[in-house]
Image (cartoon, coloured by chain):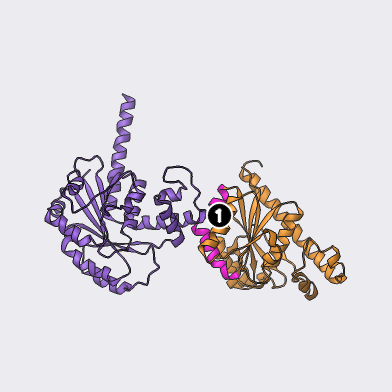
């Protein structure tokens, strides 16, 4: 069977580094290409992804078994959807402990789902090592480090770069930086990337609008590229190529 | 194969004797070791709920029920008998077996006898070890520290345990790992074996709808417990005998086919 639906886990070992922003763009991207997605918000606080996609989001508490059941069982129970898991930094370790302990990768594979972990890197060796810890526990899932232009790229540092090899990236992504005005705008509760060009946001200053368009274009291209790589890898895996 | 009796018990109630019995029966079944069980929690029979097909509920105080267990060790085709002693009945049970010559017969090699003593979080559990020591000489004595429901505060620490344990040199110890509470409850509610729960199978053998997460927790717990059990000489002997039996059966089948 050639898989089609994806479980996209957006995570990082630190807080406030763009996970929810990346997840929001991802959800909109999937909608744009006609995929139905479901979203899990593991933070539950104000400003989480559920605030932007209430109709398709579920807020789950991974620290509790009931929350784990709600997330993992729901995904495996409806494997025809794409999923975005916006993983709170507080639950980062717990999530991957459970992920491994219950054998989710195998379950997802049997259900025909692809799993991709998007790990937003901070420019510190600690962040690389945390990511490597997750990477080492994966045997089927794709691991995609995300370099944030806002946080900075540590790869110029030889020590960081040496440790970076541990991540064994399947692909890489770059999260472009936004200027202060554009950042303020995207954090407004009524802002939606899908509705950027509707009347509500027509009054946005041209500079911010330009930044946001470039931001979306850059990310969408990368999502497309990752999707293509994943599809090709699956075709090879199944002997079609 | 020499008959084997595995007694699972504790004097302290609520330490998880039946859970350990279930785990043992499950382990033996997965290793193709045929076993029958005797549930002395008369008349309710918790173990019987999980293993209705191979469990008899008996009253150990009744001579006829003692005969159902002891007088059939040699004659029954199933050579492994697990006895789940009801709560608070370990010393009394051992005393009974001592008086009617069961322990002596085991020491003389008439059959194998293993005692799995389940201890829980109370210090009273450790005191039991001293009381039980009077009966365990020459027998396979296993102390099972049950962490499965590690929701209680443990009154004893590792150092205290080792002190008690050191006084019984022939004792072996195993740890029953902690199992996620919700997973444990769900297996209990479903009334199925741990293996059936993992396999998502109902007690009737039909497809079930158990949680993937909870099944995953049970699978991991079972794998961890297997490692503990595999280290016991009693278990090694039983699994070796089962393997030898299978090999012999295969060889016979091939011979028959060739003929």
Q: Where is residue B237 in the image (x, y as percent from the top left)?
A: 26, 49
Question: What secondary structure is found at the residue carrying circle 1?
Answer: helix
Residue A205 visible in rendering: yes
In the picture, measured across the screen, residue B147 lies left or right of residue A12, that is left
Residue at 63% across, 47% down: A3
Looking at the rendering, in which quadrant would you find the N terminus of chain A? top right
- Residue receiving disc 1: A73
Figure chain in orange: A
- Prevailing SS of the magenta stretch: helix
- The question of residue B48 being in magenta is answered with no
Q: In this view, does A218 lie above or below A127?
A: above
Q: Where is residue B5 in the image (x, y as percent from the top left)?
A: 23, 50
Q: What stretch is highlighted in magenta?
A: A89-110
- The question of residue A100 being in magenta is answered with yes
Looking at the rendering, in which quadrant would you find the C terminus of chain A? top right
Q: In which quarter of the image is residue B252?
A: top left
**For mark 1, does the 10 Å Cα neighbourhood hold few (<14), some (14 to 19), or many (20 or more) residues?**
some
Q: Quadrant of residue A161?
A: bottom right
Q: Nearer the viewer, residue B20 or A136?
A: B20
Residue at 39% across, 64% down: B149
Q: Which tint is chain B?
A: purple
């Amino acid at each position: 069977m050639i898989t089609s639906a994806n479980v996209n886990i957006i995570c990082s070992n630190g807080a406030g580094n763009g996970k929810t922003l990346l997840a929001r763009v991802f959800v909109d991207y999937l909608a744009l290409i006609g995929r139905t997605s479901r979203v899990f918000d593991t933070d539950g606080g104000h400003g989480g992804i559920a605030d932007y996609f209430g109709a398709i989001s579920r807020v789950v508490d991974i620290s509790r078994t009931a929350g784990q059941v709600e997330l993992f069982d729901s995904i495996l129970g409806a494997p025809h959807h794409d999923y975005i898991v916006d993983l709170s930094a507080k639950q980062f370790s717990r999530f991957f402990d459970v992920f491994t302990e219950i054998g989710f990768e195998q379950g997802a594979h049997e259900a025909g789902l692809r799993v991709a972990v998007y790990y937003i890197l901070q420019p510190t060796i600690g962040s690389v090592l945390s990511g490597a810890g997750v990477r080492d526990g994966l045997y089927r899932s794709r691991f995609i480090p995300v370099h944030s232009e806002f946080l900075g790229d540590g790869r110029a540092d030889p020590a960081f770069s040496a440790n970076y090899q541990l991540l064994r990236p399947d692909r890489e992504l770059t999260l472009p930086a936004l200027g202060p005005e554009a950042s303020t705008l995207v954090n407004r509760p009524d802002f939606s990337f899908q509705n950027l060009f509707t009347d509500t946001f027509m009054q946005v200053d041209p500079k911010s609008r330009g930044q946001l368009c470039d931001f979306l274009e850059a990310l969408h291209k990368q999502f497309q590229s990752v999707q293509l790589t994943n599809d090709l890898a699956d075709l090879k895996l199944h002997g079609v190529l | 194969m020499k008959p084997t009796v595995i007694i699972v018990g504790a004097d302290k109630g609520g330490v998880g004797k039946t859970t350990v019995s279930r785990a043992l029966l499950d382990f033996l079944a997965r290793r193709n070791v045929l076993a029958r069980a005797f549930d002395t929690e008369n008349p309710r029979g918790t173990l019987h709920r999980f293993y209705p097909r191979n469990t008899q509920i008996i009253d150990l105080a009744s001579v006829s029920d003692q005969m159902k267990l002891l007088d059939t060790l040699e004659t029954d085709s199933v050579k492994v008998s697990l006895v789940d002693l009801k709560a608070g009945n370990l010393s009394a049970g051992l005393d009974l077996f001592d008086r009617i010559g069961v322990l002596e017969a085991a020491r003389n090699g008439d059959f194998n006898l293993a005692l799995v003593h389940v201890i829980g979080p109370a210090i009273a559990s450790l005191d039991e070890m001293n009381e039980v020591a009077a009966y365990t000489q020459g027998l396979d004595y296993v102390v099972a520290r049950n962490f499965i429901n590690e929701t209680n505060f443990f009154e004893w620490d590792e150092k205290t345990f080792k002190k008690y344990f050191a006084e019984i040199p022939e004792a072996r110890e195993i740890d029953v790992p902690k199992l996620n509470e919700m997973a444990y409850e769900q297996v209990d509610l479903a009334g199925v074996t741990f293996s059936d729960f993992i396999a998502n199978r109902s007690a009737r053998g039909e497809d079930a709808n158990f949680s993937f997460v909870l099944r995953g927790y049970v699978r991991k717990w079972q794998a961890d417990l297997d490692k503990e059990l595999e280290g016991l000489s009693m278990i090694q002997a039983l699994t070796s005998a089962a393997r030898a039996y299978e090999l012999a059966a295969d060889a016979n089948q091939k011979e028959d086919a060739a003929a």
